[in-house]
Image (spheres, rainbow, N blue to C red):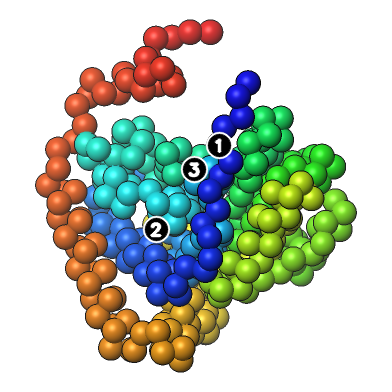
Amino acid sequence: MEAPEAPTVRAGDPPLRTLYEQMLRIRHFETKLDVLYRQGRVRGPAHLGIGQEAIAVGVASVLGLGDASLGTYRGHAHALARGADEEAVLRELLGREGGICGGKGGSMHITSVEHGYYGSYAIVGGHIPTAVGMAWASRIRGDGAVTACFFGDGTTNIGAFHEAVNLAALWRLPAVFVCENNQYMEYTPIGDVIPVARPAADRASAYGLEPVVVDGNDVIAVREVAGAAVDRARRGDGPTLIEATTYRLGGHSAADGAAYRDPDEVSAAWERDPIVALANRLALDGEATPEETDQLVARVKADMDAMAVRVLAAPTPDPAAAWTGMWSDGSSTWRN
Ligand SMILES: Cc1ncc(C[n+]2csc(CCOP(=O)(O)OP(=O)(O)O)c2C)c(N)n1
Ligand SMILES: [Mg+2]
C-alpha cells in the first residue's frame, strides 16, 4: 500500500490573536446555540463546552492536516477548532439542509473527516479504543500521522480507557490522550467517584507514562504541552496522557440548569474564564488593546446572530436524503 503524504505540521507559533479569535468564535457559537436551544429550535441534546475552549484550540493548533482527532458528545469546539465550517455545524444542529453530517448526526456526532476530525462519540470512552486503532493503523501504514483523543474526567473510570491506554503505551503508538478535567461527571463532582485527586495523571504510571497536568484554561500552556506530546508521538516515542484542568461553566447539557452546584464555585470559575485571561494577556503584550478585543467580541456576536438568521431561514433536508450516504460509497442498500 502506498504511504499517504506525511502530515503538514503548522510551522511556527500562530499569533495569540488568532488563537483568541478561534476561542472567541467557539464561545459565541455555543452561547448562541444555548439561546436557540432554549427557544426549542435544537432537536436532541446539546452538550456545550463553554469554559473549555482553550483545550480544543490549543491542541488543534499543533495538529497537522493529516493528523486525526476524536472527541465526545461535547465536541462542537473540537470540530470547529480543526476548521469545520461554523455554518455547516449550525445547519446540522438546527436540522437544516447542508448540515455537516447531512442531518444524520446532530450535536453528539459532529464529524468532519475533511478536517481530520473523526467524530464526536456519545458512548463514554467508546472512542478511545477507536483512536488507538487509528494510531495503530498509522504505525502500520507509516504515514507519520498522530491521533489525538479527547475525553472527560469521568471517562477515566471506564474500562475502555484503561484497555486502550495500556495497548497504546505497550506498542508506543502515536497517540495523544487528552483528559479534559472539567470537575464534573454529569451531575456528580468528580471527587465523589474517583479515589485519586487527578483522574488521568494519577493513573498514568500504571501504564509507564509520565503524569502530565496542564492548566486547561491557558491556551499557551496547552499548546506547549500538546506540541511536546505530538512531537514525541511522531518521533515514535509513544503516547502521552495529558490531564488538562478546567471547569464546565454551564450544565452537563444545555437542558441542565446545574442547580446542584455551589454558586460561589461557579462564580470563582468565571473569574478564571480562559477567554478573558487571554484578552488580558493580549493587552499586556501590546497585541490588542481592550478596545480592540471589545470590537472583536461585538463583531463575532454579530456574525453568530446573522448566521443563525440565515440558517433558520434555510429549508429542512429533502426526506429522500435519509436514504443516502449510509455507506462510504454513498449507497444505503442493506448488506451483511
Ligand atoms: C458507556 C456510557 N455510560 C454512561 C453514559 C451516560 N453519560 C453521558 S455523559 C456522562 C458523564 C461523562 O463525564 P466526563 O467523562 O467527565 O465528561 P464530561 O461530560 O464532563 O465532558 C455519562 C455518565 C454514556 N453516555 N455512556
Ligand atoms: Mg467531566
Label 2, on which residue? Answer: 254
Residue at screen point 66% across, 55% down: 230
From mark 1 to mark 3, how far is it between C-alphas? Answer: 14 Å
Q: Is 64 placed left or right of 104 in the picture? A: right
Across and down, in percent, residue 314 comes to 14, 43
Whether residue 148 is visible to the viewer of this picture, yes or no, is: yes
Secondary element at tag 3 = loop
Is the N terminus in the top left, top right, bottom left or bottom right quadrant?
Answer: top right
Q: Nearer the viewer, residue 290 or 217?
A: 290
Secondary element at tag 2 = loop
The answer to whether the residue labelled 1 contacts the one labelled 3, judged by CB atoms less than 8 Å apart, is: no
Q: Amino acid at mark 3?
A: Gly
The answer to whether the residue labelled 2 contacts the one labelled 3, judged by CB atoms less than 8 Å apart, is: no
Across and down, in percent, residue 131 comes to 64, 40
Give the label, 1 or 3, closer to the camera.
1
Q: On screen, 160 above or below 1?
A: below
Across and down, in percent, residue 58 comes to 53, 64
Q: Is 51 placed left or right of 163 in the picture? A: left
Q: Is 95 placed left or right of 260 in the picture? A: left
From mark 2 to mark 3, how far is it between C-alphas? Answer: 27 Å
Mark 3, residues whose alpha carbon is within 10 Å: few (<14), some, or many (≥20)? many
